[in-house]
Image: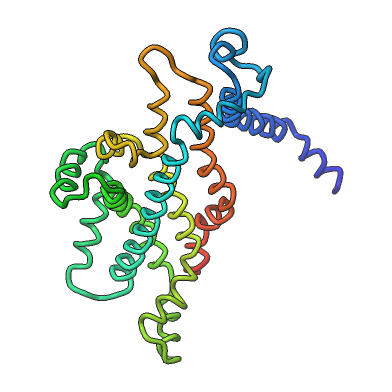
Amino acid sequence: MKQNKQIKKNSPGRIAFVVFCWLYAAFSLYPLIWMLFYSLKNNDEIFVTNPFGFPTHFRVENYIKAFHSYNVPRYFLNSLLVSGATVIGVLVCSLFFSYATSRMEWKGRGFFRTFLGLGIFIPAQSIMIPVVKQVKAINLIGTRWSLIFPYIAINLAFSCMIYYGFFKGIPRELEEAACIDGANIYQTFFMVIMPLVKPATVTLAIYTFLNAWNEFILANVLVGSIPDLKTLPLGVLFFQGSFTTDWGAMGATMVISSLPAIIVYALFSEQVEKAMTIGGSVKG
């Protein structure tokens, strides 16, 4: 029996699959490794002497220049505040809306759920002009709210769809049992329902955070002319001069801007995997 398992383990198909996985991992990780090497070189080494190899000298001064000469801490703080506020706004709004449309009976709930769900099919680029006009109309230009509110609106449709699927999979008997024990609707929601959708909450928090952190086009239109409100993706543009560009410092900024996304996903990747299967297990 053990010999058969060993043969199956070393079968050509399995070996080919393992080789494919390692090759895929190498291709996926190489851009990150190259970007790290890129941030530790100067312009001559990047383009002439050593474009793809290991840095001959670790030029840490690229990171120092990025922090002190190009205002990267300010851009980092702006990205962090905007992304964090967007995550909170999206989770709160989508939680309450999805619970109301999936667990409560009221007139028009199907229409409002469908109307909001249609937002998934609308590209953000197609509504850019109306968004800018609306932001100006409510006097948010020149504040971080000019980014936060549009980001919340853009991510709301997808979050509501995910939460709606999770809420529909939760047996109503749990709420009925909580009511019998004397819990009101708020206690039932916060103490019974919310813990059951925790995997979805973590997944949506990661998804929303990465969307807001990496967004460039709308940010460039709304705050591109205001230096103190620029986010990290916009800050990279400052490294491109009219005649010369400090590519090493630009690489350092790209590494800094990528770190939060990598760390967030590395810490919560297990929760993302659970979210893919938790719906069926709760329903069953």
Q: Nearer the viewer, residue 58 or 187?
A: 58
Residue 207 x %, y % = 43, 49
- What residue sits 17% from the left and 68% below the top? 108
User: In this picture, is 89 found above or below 120?
Assistant: below
- What residue sits 54% from the left and 40% below the top? 259
User: In this picture, is 149 found above or below 178?
Assistant: above
Q: Nearer the viewer, residue 283 or 57?
A: 57
Q: Nearer the viewer, residue 36 or 114?
A: 36
Judging from the image, the colouring scheme is rainbow
Farthest residue toward the top?
Answer: 48
Farthest residue toward the front?
Answer: 68
User: In this picture, is 19 found above or below 218?
Assistant: above
Residue 77 x %, y % = 43, 46
Residue 137 x %, y % = 13, 49
Residue 228 x %, y % = 34, 40
User: Taking 47 as reference, is 11 left or right?
Assistant: right
Q: Nearer the viewer, residue 187 or 104?
A: 187
User: Taking 16 as reference, is 188 left or right?
Assistant: left
- What residue sits 20% from the left and 41% below the top? 127
- What residue sits 40% from the left and 51% below the top? 81
User: In this picture, is 180 found above or below 140?
Assistant: below
| Count of numbered tags | 0
